[in-house]
């Protein structure tokens, strides 16, 4: 089992910034890749960003956040981060971190473990 706990929820004005964190515990040695997803009211969960947990430098971003969001990690702290800049009202959603033991993917179905979610609201 892998446990994931997000933090960093907040209400931010458009154009502002926010940093989300995801602390992993349990069998972290089994993690191959981690990602961030979000879900707005009435919409399906969508991909935001992903990266390999160990090794490599490649990252994946949704077109809607490319150039504004940055995914990063601190393996020593078993923590994943999402730096969000130039926030827009359309970024308002519950944000989830996720871990995959097998895949590096943009598909929610490829991930095995999920955090509880953290609310991000961007006002205009």
Image (cartoon, rainbow, N blue to C red):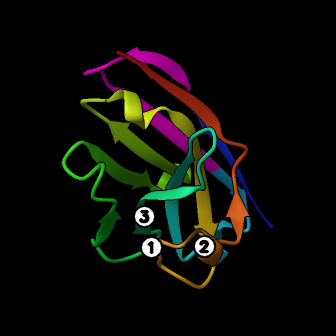
Q: Can you identify the residue that label 1 sits on?
A: 54
Q: Sequence order check: which comes first, mark 1 or mark 2? A: 2
Measuring from the top left, give residue 37's x and y in whole percent.
53, 54
Apparent side of residue 44 relative to residue 105 in the rendered image (left or right): right
Measuring from the top left, give residue 31's x and y in whole percent.
60, 73
Q: Sequence order check: which comes first, mark 2 or mark 3? A: 2
Secondary structure of the residue carrying numbered label 2 = loop
Q: Residues within 10 Å of mark 2 (few under 14, many from 20)?
A: some
Measuring from the top left, give residue 53's x and y in whole percent.
47, 68
What residue lies at 66% left-to-right and 41% top-to-bottom? 117
Contact check, label 1 and label 2, Cβ < 8 Å: yes
Principal SS element in the magenta part?
strand
Q: Can you identify the residue that label 2 sits on?
A: 31
Q: Is residue 7 above or below residue 81?
A: above
In three-dimensional space, the C-alpha distance between marks 1 and 3, rounded to whole angstroms, equals 12 Å
The mark found on residue 50 in the picture is 3
Apparent side of residue 43 relative to residue 65 in the rendered image (left or right): right
Measuring from the top left, give residue 23's x and y in whole percent.
61, 46
Q: Nearer the viewer, mark 2 or mark 3?
A: 3
* Quarter of the image that includes the N terminus: bottom right
Q: Is residue 16 above or below residue 92?
A: above
Apparent side of residue 3 relative to residue 7 in the rendered image (left or right): right
* Quarter of the image that includes the C terminus: top left
Q: Quadrant of residue 3?
A: bottom right
Q: The magenta stretch spans which residues?
A: 8-23
Contact check, label 1 and label 3, Cβ < 8 Å: no
Say whether residue 19 is magenta.
yes
The mark found on residue 80 in the picture is none
In three-dimensional space, the C-alpha distance between marks 1 and 2, rounded to whole angstroms, equals 8 Å
Apparent side of residue 64 relative to residue 76 in the rendered image (left or right): left
What residue lies at 56% left-to-right and 54% top-to-bottom? 78
Number of numbered markers: 3
């Amino acid at each position: 089992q892998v446990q994931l706990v997000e933090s960093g929820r907040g209400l931010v004005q458009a154009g502002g910034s926010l940093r989300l964190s995801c602390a992993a515990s349990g069998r972290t040695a089994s993690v191959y890749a981690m990602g961030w997803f979000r879900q707005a009211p009435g919409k399906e969960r969508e991909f935001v960003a992903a990266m390999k947990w160990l090794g490599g430098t490649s990252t994946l971003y949704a077109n809607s956040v490319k150039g504004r969001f940055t995914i990063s990690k601190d393996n020593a702290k078993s923590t994943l981060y999402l730096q969000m800049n130039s926030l827009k009202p359309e970024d308002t959603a519950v944000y989830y971190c996720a871990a995959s033991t097998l895949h590096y993917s943009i598909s929610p179905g490829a991930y095995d473990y999920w955090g509880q979610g953290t609310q991000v609201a961007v006002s205009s």
